[in-house]
Amino acid sequence: MDNEIIQHIGNNQDIRALFKAAERLNCDPASYYLDRRGHLVVPGEDVAPEARTAIYARVRYKNSILFAWPKFGNGFADLPGGGIEAQEVRPVALAREWWEETGLAMPFTPIRVPDGHYEQRLNFYAEDANRFLQDYHQIFVAYDDPGNIPHGFLARERWSTPEGDVSWVPIDQIRHTPINRAHWPAITSLVPELRGVELAPASRFPRKLSPTAGQVSAYAPTPWG
């Protein structure tokens, strides 16, 4: 189980760092959860982990990628998307989440075959809601053009929605941007220019939220955070 959890997190150096952090927590690697900053968290005894599947879109326009800064994201950016609800098919979930996070209609209608695809499973701690997502199945689809996104939004660097902020980030600036660490393997897989590139440590960015007492039994930074 431990190898399955970490196999998509990053390169061998990343994996060694995770194991060292797990040793500091004195826990089995299968029992820890990754948070947005790349820290390891172990749930309290009374916490019931949840199962969840989510889908996200990596959309490219020239040399920029679209990111969403959800209000619940602790200041870290995600690729636009989110959880798939019960009885919801993937294209419908992606279109709904895309609209909620970007304020735009899904630009690939009808949903076309993506230009790239990446999936991973990991344990993830969503500290905004104090939710522990076990074997969290994340699906990422890539589109190498902006589809039917209105031209006005292609020329706009940043805009806001009720869910948070949305921004085009130039590819050469992404590694210096606060990015959800759980999304980084997908980003490096689906953005060829970033393959082998390390994300800047999250310690450069201030922490806005703290884990709720009683929910977390142990907590350890990694070289990422």
Image (tube, rainbow, N blue to C red):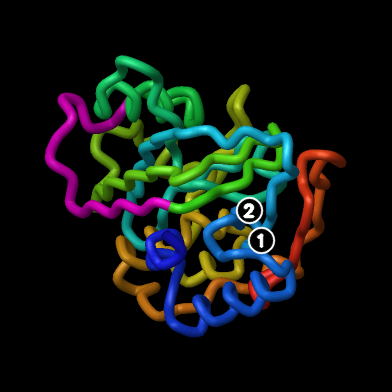
Mark 1 is on which residue type?
A: Leu
Please report the bounds of the magenta region as a residue range. Answer: 106-121
The quarter of the picture where the N terminus appears is bottom left
Q: Position of residue 79 (x, y in %)?
A: 45, 46
Q: Residues within 10 Å of mark 1 (few under 14, many from 20)?
A: many
| Quarter the C terminus occupies | bottom right
Q: Quick check: 106 above or below 121?
A: above
Look at 58% across and 75% down and name the residue there.
19
Residue 71, by quadrant, is: top right
Q: Main secondary structure of the magenta part?
A: loop
Could you tell me the amino acid type at mark 2? Asp
Between residue 107 and residue 42, name the one nearer to us: 42
The reply to whether discs 2 and 1 touch (Cβ–Cβ < 8 Å) is yes
Q: What residue does disc 2 label?
A: 35
| Residue at 14% from the left image edge and 35% from the top image edge | 112
Q: Secondary structure at mark 2?
A: loop
> Residue 192 location in percent, x, y?
30, 71
Judge by depth and name the residue closer to the eye, 6 or 81. Answer: 6
Mark with earlier residue (2, 1): 2
Numbered mark located on residue 13 in the image: none
* In the foreground, 181 or 45: 45
Secondary structure of the residue carrying numbered label 1 = strand
As for residue 43 lying within the magenta part, the answer is: no
Residue 111 located within the stretch drawn in magenta: yes
The residue at which mark 1 appears reads as 40
In the rendered image, residue 196, in percent from the top left (x then y), is placed at 40, 80
Q: Position of residue 40 (x, y in %)?
A: 66, 61
Q: Residue at x 38, y 43 (%)?
A: 137
Q: Answer with left or right where residue 69 lies relative to residue 207.
A: left
Would you place residue 130 above or below residue 39 in this image?
Answer: above
Nearer mark to the viewer, of 2 and 1: 1
Q: Residue at x 76, y 59 (%)?
A: 219
